[in-house]
Amino acid sequence: MLDRNFETQSVDPMFLEPECGLGWYDRKDAKLELVLGVQSPYEATESIAYLLGNARAPFKPAHINTQFTYVGGGFGGRDHTPFVLYVALAAMFFPGKPVRLAHDRYQQFQGGIKRHPFKIRSQIGVDRVTGKITAFAADHVLDGGGLQNFSPNVATVAATAAIGIYDVPKVDVTTVALHSRGVTAGSMRGYGTIQTMTALEVLIDEAAAALPLNPIEFRRRNALKQNGRTMTGNPYVVSVRTPEILDKLEMHPIWRQRAEEKARLKSSGTLVGTGVACVTKDYGTGADTSLGRVELSPDGKISIICDHVEMGNGIGTALANRVALHLGGVADEVSVARVDTFQPLGLVTSGDVRAMDEKTQDNLAKNPRWVPEISTATSASIGAHVGTHAAAEAARVIFQHGLWPAALALWHIPPTDPRAKDSAKASWKGGQLTVAGLPPLDLPALAAAAYAHNLVTGAIAHSFCRWAWARARFQVGNEQHRAEIDALAIRKGGGAFAALKRTSVWFPPTDNNRIGTAFASTCGTLVRVEIERASGAIRIAKAYSVFECGQPLVPEVVLGQAQGGFAMGVGYALLENLPPLEGGPGNGQWNLGQYLVARGSDLPLHDLEIEMLPPLTPDEPPKGMAEVVMIPVVPALLNAIFDATGHRFQSLPVTQATLKGVIA
Amino acid sequence: MTRLAITINGRAIEPLEVRDDLSMNDFLREYLGMTGTKFGCGAAQCLSCAIIVDNPDGTSYASPTCVVPAASFDGKAIRTIEGHAKNGELTALQKAFIDHFAFQCGYCTAGFLNEAQVLLERLAKKPVARAALEETIAEALDGQICRCTGYIKYHQAVRDVILADPQRYLA
Amino acid sequence: MLGTSQLTGYAASQTLSNNLASPDSFADIADQDARSAAIFTELGKVLTHPRCMNCHPAGDRPRQGEGAWRRLHQPPVARGADGHGLEAMRCSICHGYANFEPGRMPGHPEWHLAPREMGWEGKTLAEICEQLRDPARNGGRKGEDLIHHIGEDTLVGWAWHPGFGRSPVPGTQQQAGALVAAWVKTGAACPAK
C-alpha cells in the first residue's frame, strides 16, 4: 500500500496572441458591434447578452452583432474567458467611439485564465502475489482562484480520470475546487486529468518498483479491458486499445535498451534514465453540438460553414477532408467560428442540458425545432469527432439526395432500376464518382445536373452528442433520411434553404449525464533523459509517443498536435511555474523572460518519434486526441528522472535548480 | 519627435515625424496597418514581431520590433512578411511551410519566415557543411517561441528547402 | 498602462540603491594596505552589483535580473566569437543605442559580454581584486586605464541609469571612479577574502 501526496503548479496557456477585441456601440440605433476571438462563440454571445440584458438605458443595446475571428492559439484559455465581457463594457461606456481592448503580455499573464494547481493525496493497494491493484483512493483539492469559471467541471473531469487506464475494483475519490485570492483558473489542455494522471502514473511506477514488477507488465495486468466498467460504472463505447499501446511501448528500443544506455554513460558526469507512462483521456463533454452548412455551386465548388473555431487545430482542413469523403472534392471555401448563418434551421433550446430528466426532455423534444443545446465550445478535443460531424452529415444529405440522383440521371438509370439503391457501392476516385461498369462522373458535371434537375444542392445540419449522437428522420422528397442529426434544412437547385420537420427523433437518454465519460483515446510515452551531474541540466535524448485516434481526418495535423503536445508537456514538467499570490502573475510583472516555455533547444527535435495506430476498422470514427498526447509526457519525464537519480519527485515543475539540489 | 524615412519591402515610405517612444511594432501595425508582423510578448522573448533589416553591405538580420523604437529605423531598408510573396507567388520557404504543415495557429509564423529567410541568405553567402546543418538551423531559430507546433516541422521545412538546393546552401 | 507597475518596479530598485563612501571616509585607517583594501571592498559594491555581474559571467551566457529573480538571460543568448552574440542573435539586435523604456529594454552602443577572463561570477572579492589588477586578465590595463574604464566608460556608466525595473549601482560613476583612483593611489591592495 502506498500513500503519497502530489502537488502541481499554476501555469498559463501562453497562447502567442494576447487576448483582444473590438467594439463599437451606436447609441442612435442601440446597436453593439463586436469582433472577438474565443473558443466558444455562441457562449460568448450569450454571456454578453446576459450581461447587458437587464441593464438600464443607455447601457442596454437593442441589438448585439458579434463576429468571430481565427485566434492565435487557445488551449482552453479562450474558452469561457471573461475578457469578452470587458470588451462589451468598454464599447458601451464609449458610445460612438471605436474601442479596441488589447492585453499586452504582462496583462495577459495577469488576467488570463490559468490551469488549476492541484494538491493530491493518493492511496493505492496492490496484491503482491497477483500484481493487481485492489483499491485506490484520492482526494483532490484545486485552487480555482477568484472566479468560479470552469472549476466544478475541471474538478469532476480530473476525478473521473484518477484511475487512468486501470481497472480497479474499489475506488474512492473526492474532488473539491476552492475559491481563493489567486488568479482565476479554468479550462486548459488536459482539464484536470493531466494533474491527476501525472500523480497516478508516478504512483504506478513506484508501486511497480515496490513489488517488483516490470512497469509495463504491471500496467498490462491492470489495464481496463474493452467492456470493462470505468470509475463511474459505464464501459467506454469506443475502442479501448491499451494492450496494443503497451505492447508498442515495451517493444520500442528506448525501453529495451534502457539498461545498456544507463551503463554506457555510467562513469561520465551524466545520469541516464528511462521513463514510461500510459494514459487515457476522455474527449467530449457529454453535451456537445455541431453545426454545419455545406453548399455546392453549379460548377461544383464546395463551401462549408461551421461554428467551431480555428485556433491552430486545423478544423478548416479537417472539415474539408471529411466533407470530401462524401462530395469527392476539397472545399473551395471554409468559414469557421460562425454562429450566424444557421437561421433556416430555426433552432430553439431550453432547460439545463446536463440536469434535465427524461420526461422533461421527451416533452421538449416534441417541438421539432427544439434541441438540447444550440452551439458549444471548441474544446475537450472535440474538433475531429464533433466539429466536423454536422458538416459531414450535411454533405451526406447532398450526396444522397443531390449528387446520387444526379448521377443516376446522367447514367440514364431510372429509379425503378435496382442499381438506383446502390449508392453505397459508389466511391470517389480522383474527383470522380465511380461505380463498377458505369462511366465515372466528375463533380462539376454532377453539380450541374443537380441544379438542372432541381435536386438537393445544399444542406444545413445540427447534431447533439451526449455520449451518443442524437438521431432523427427527415422526409426528403419521397425518401426518408435517417441520420445522426437532430435538425436539417435543405436547398434545391438555386432555391432558398427551408427546414425539414423531423418526423421522429431520439435524443441520448438524460441518464447519460451520470456517465463520467464514454469516449476516450489512449497514448503512451517513453523518454530517455540525460542529466548533467554538475549542473542538474536535463536533456531529453530520445522520446516516443504512440497513440490511437480512430480515423485521422488530417494525419499531418494529428502529427503536429502530438509534437506540440509533447512540447507543452515538457514545459509543464520541467519549466513552467507561476508562484501563487503576490509573487505571481497577478502582480503584472510577468513575461516570457520569467515564465519559460519550451524552446527548440529544450526538445529532442530529431529524436521524437510519434506513432499513430491505424484505425481499428476502416469505418472507425475519428477520436479526439489533442489533449491525450500531452499528458503521458509529464509522468514519463518524472519516472525517467527517478530512474536516473533515484529521486522520485512529488511536485511540478522539476527544474534544473531542483535537480541540482537533489543530485548534489 | 524624430524624422523617420524608411524603405519597406522595396517601397520608400513618405517620411514622417514619429514620437521617440513609439515602438517599431506599433508603427508597422497601428500607423501603417501592416498587421502581418505580430505582437506576442513585447519583451523580445518570442520574436513573433521580427522583421528583416537589410544592411547596405548586403547582409541582413532579423530584428524584433517590439523593443526597438521606430525612430531607430530611420534610413533603413526592411522587409516584412507582406513582402515575401511576389505577385502571389510564394517563396520556397512559404511553400515548404505549407507542404510540411509546419505552422498551426500561424501567429509565430511571420517571425519564423523572416528568421529562416535571413538564414537562407546567410548560407548562400557562407555555406555550411551538411553535418552542421541541423545545428545551424537550430541555433538560428532558437530565438523564436512557438506554443502550438513543438518546432519540429518548422525545422524540417527549413532543412528541406536547403537540401533541395545543396549547391547554393551547403559547402 | 505602465503607471502602477512602473511604480512598483521603481520602488524595488530604490531599496537596493544606496550611496558609495568617498575615499576620504577611509582616511582614519592608518595602514596603507589595509586602507587600500578597504577602499576596494567599498568598490566591491559596484563590481558585484547585478548590473555589472550579469555581463561578467563565468561562462558564455549572460544573466539578467536581480535578487530572487536573477536568472540566465532569456531568450537564451550566448557569447559568440566576439562577445557580441551568435550569428542569429547579436546583442545589438535587441539592445539598441539607449534604453527604450516602453520595451523595458536596456541599451548602449557597445552592448556585449566582458571577455571570459574578466568573468567575476562565483568569485570572492579577493579573487576579483587579483583579477582586476592583473594585466594578463584585465585587458592589459594599467591603473590609469582602470580609473578611466570604471570612472568614465559609458557602457560601465549605463549601470547607474539602467532603466525600468532594474536597480542602479550604488552611488554615481564619479564616486566609483574616485574610489578606483584612490585604490590605485594607495597601492591597489586586495582584501583578504
Image: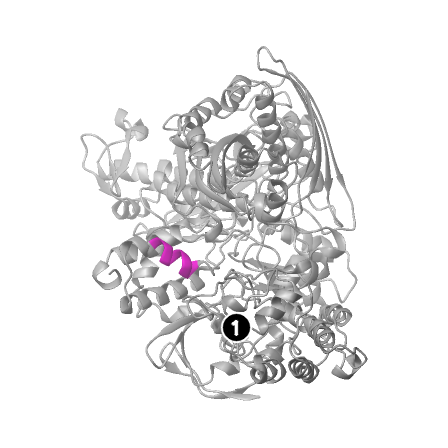
The image position of residue B48, as x and y in percent, is: 49, 63
Q: Give the farthest residue toward the front.
A: C31
Give the magenta range: B134-141
Q: Please determine whether, in this image, residue A550 is positioned above or below residue C77.
A: above
At 60% across and 32% down in the image, what residue appears? A197
List the residue tagged with mark 1. B25
Estimate the x, y position of residue C172 in percent, counting from the top left.
70, 81
Q: Is residue C43 left or right of residue A559?
A: right
Would you say residue B138 sits in the magenta stretch? yes
Q: Tell me which corner region of the image, top left, top right, bottom left or bottom right, holds residue A263.
A: top left
Residue A549 in sight in this render? no
Which secondary structure lies at badge 1? Answer: helix
Q: Chain of mark 1?
A: B
Whether residue B75 is in magenta: the answer is no
Screen quadrant of the C terminus of chain B: bottom left
Quadrant position of the N terminus of chain B in the picture: bottom right
Q: In the current view of this chain or complex, which residue is farthest to the top? A: A129
Q: Taking C68 as reference, is A546 above or below it?
A: above
Nearest the viewer among C7 and A629 is: C7
Q: Is residue C163 left or right of residue B102?
A: right
Question: Of A656 and B153, which appears nearest the observer?
Answer: A656
Rendered view: B64 above or below A227: below
Residue A469: x percent and y percent?
53, 31
* Residue at 69% over, 36% down: A155
Q: How would you rate the neighbour count of disc 1 (Cα within 10 Å): few for under 14, some for 14-19, many for 20 or more?
A: many
